[in-house]
Image (spheres, grey):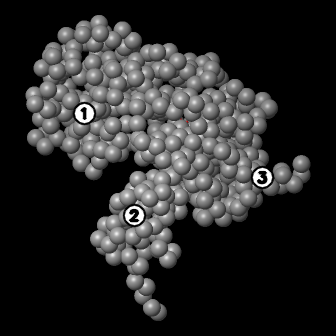
Amino acid sequence: MTVLQPPVQKNNYYDVTVEDLTHDGAGVAKISGYPIFVSNALPQEAIKIKITKVKKGYAFGRLEEIYQPSPYRVDAPCPIYKQCGGCQLQHLSYEGQLLAKQKQVQDVLERIGHLKDIPVHPVLGMEEPWRYRNKAQVPVGEREGGLIAGFYQQRSHEIIEMKDCLIQQETNDRVVQKVKGICETHGVRSYNEKSHRGTLRHIMARYGLVTGETMVVLITRTADLPNKKQIIEDITTALPEVKSIVQNVNPQKTNVIFGEETKVLWGEEYIYDFIGDIKFAISARSFYQVNPDQTKVLYDKALEYAGLTGEETVIDAYCGIGTISLFLAQKAQKVYGVEIVPEAIEDANRNAKLNGIQNVEFGVGEAEVVIPNWYKDGITADVLVVDPPRKGCDEALLQTIIEMKPKKVVYVSCNPGTLARDLRVLEDGGYQTVEVQPVDMFPHTNHVEVVSQMILKEEAGSR
Ligand code: SAH
């Protein structure tokens, strides 16, 4: 067997054409079929690159010059785009981003799931794709004696000051800066990772888009917060939209943000928000979707794909705080939700009550254990919804679905790769993928959310 030499050499320059975009936003060019990843390069661009690293099967190159830019190339509007790393696609126009995400889903379904000829609809994007995040979680540091709040520079623990994040709700940026200033005035020192001293580690601001209510969370190393009373007074005076001030204590040497202990310093334990008609109570530690407008778009699609008439029993696997379950309960006879995090289920039950929804029941545990047990006990579903984390569904859950034979499976996914893998298993087990709808929940980042509809083939045949 001949060992093929990579066709490029480190530090050499090459002229190439970019063919594709990786899921993390790098351009891919090829020389004799050998892929080279180039940060900041876009498909269709003719560019000059310098090779920075050579591996057996691929290489990395640095963009040196663009001879022919992509028609979708734009100047990234954010001045700290490159340092931050929170967004990956600001140099691609929004239209270009939506096209790239659609293509990515199509390619992955074909490559990993061997699913050809399945309609992947154009990505449902935002009309105004900026300022959408309802939660800011920023590390606090010090510079020249003053506090700074911002972000960790890519691949480092250096905090860079950020007063304005273009994908963040303006109110959150303003609240963080104000709270930082108030803490500084009252002599609060920032936490120092190296010496494990100081107090204030992070400031978090959460905003209810519909209600306008804001929560401030101070994450501190010590339970003691100097000048607490004055800090609270100044925050409530300066920021009347704040309904809740919470302290979370994290004494550990860790880069995990939150610690175990959470206490309300002032005001309410919860702020509220709505997705559609459903009201949600959000505590400092609750999971809540960061882009509620697009969450509504995604869940409306899931609801449409579920095709409920009011007669159905539905299982919502990986239900989190019950967002999808409560959405579906309005149109179903009964919804069973299951989730591994007990606190999320407490929230789910609270939210069900808050909305007077009685036809839901939540279970705590692994979906792949709880659902098979339910099935043994005679609980089956007409429609089964899954919304798993990035690693996708557990094999045991997929096998139970195949045995249980719900007429429809609605698969909500934040990772097209594992979606494609799991759709393949369900296809082989008797399901047919009808259509796939990507939704852009996180504009300017490389994330893509997808909802897909599957029907049982026997069903398809008998219609
Ligand atoms: N559908 C929810 C959130 C889905 S995120 C919403 O819309 O809000 C995925 C969820 O799956 C997380 O809440 C995570 O805690 C949960 N999870 C992870 N592994 C799980 C498992 N094996 N069984 C059940 N839930 C799991």
Q: CA distance from mark 2 to mark 3?
A: 50 Å
Front label number (2 vs 3):
2
What residue would you read off at disc 3?
456
Query: In the rendering, at what x and y percent does residue 89 appear?
Result: 45, 46
Q: CA distance from mark 1 to mark 3?
A: 53 Å
Query: In the rendering, at what x and y percent does residue 297 appear?
Result: 62, 33
Query: In the rendering, at what x and y percent does residue 180 appear?
Result: 23, 22
What residue would you read off at disc 2?
48
Give whichever of discs 1 and 2 has the lower sequence position. 2
**Does residue 52 appear anywhere in the picture?**
yes
What residue would you read off at disc 1?
161
What kind of element bears circle 1? strand
Location of residue 417 (image quadrant): bottom right
- Circle 2 crowding by C-alpha within 10 Å: few under 14, some 14–19, many from 20: some
Mark 2 within 8 Å of ligand 1, using the beta carbon: no
Q: Which mark is residue 371?
A: none
